[in-house]
Image: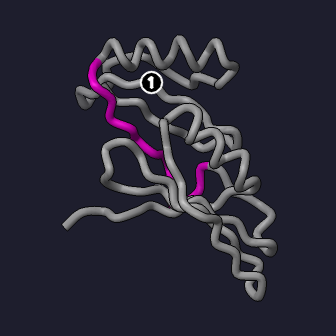
Amino acid sequence: MKIEHVGLWVGNLETMRDFYVTNFKATFGARYDNVTKGFSSYFLSFPDGQTRLEIMTRTDITDCYPDGFGYAHLAFSVENHATVDQMVIDFKKSGIEVVSGPRTTGDGYYEAVILDPEGNQIELVG
């Protein structure tokens, strides 16, 4: 068994799609729109070809609740510590907020945490 995809509600579908394409080499298929429900989404695939990310928006969802129950973060596994370090340098240069790290956590991960354009946490684990 494996996780096929994770769904993430977003406010701006195209901005979030472009963020993952630019920074994580995501590819995407056609935009899905359900006009009746006011729902739109993209499925994003990453170079490893495993789990996908579905970014979704709906016209009746206008508020987000940070640090509530539910989605906490996405974690991307990268090649090694040096890749984490380089990604942090690149993210800082491009104005992406680095929340923490790089560092070795208490549970042994070497990680850094960044924020996507809507404030969702993304862990880079090497």
Q: Which of 67 and 117 is in front in this view?
A: 117
Residue tagged 1: 112
Q: Residue furthest bottom?
A: 36
**Crowding at mark 1 (Cα within 10 Å: few <14, some 14-19, many 20+):** many
- Which percent across, then down, holds residue 9? 63, 61
Task: Decide: is 99 above or below 27.
Answer: above
Residue 95's spot in the image, x, y percent? 69, 20
Q: Nearer the viewer, residue 55 or 104?
A: 55
Eyeballing the image, is 98 above or below 115? Answer: above
Looking at the image, residue 3 sits to the left or right of residue 69; the answer is left
- Which secondary structure type mostly characterizes the magenta part of the structure? loop
Instruction: Specify the farthest residue to the left.
Output: 1
**69 in magenta:** yes
Residue at 55% x, 15% y is 90
Secondary structure beneath dot 1 equals: strand
Residue 108 covered by magenta stretch: no
Q: Which corner quadrant holds the N terminus?
A: bottom left
Q: Quadrant of the C terminus?
A: top left
**Count of number-bearing discs:** 1
**Amino acid at dot 1:** Ala
Q: What stretch is highlighted in magenta?
A: 67-80
Viewer-proximal residue among 15 and 108: 15
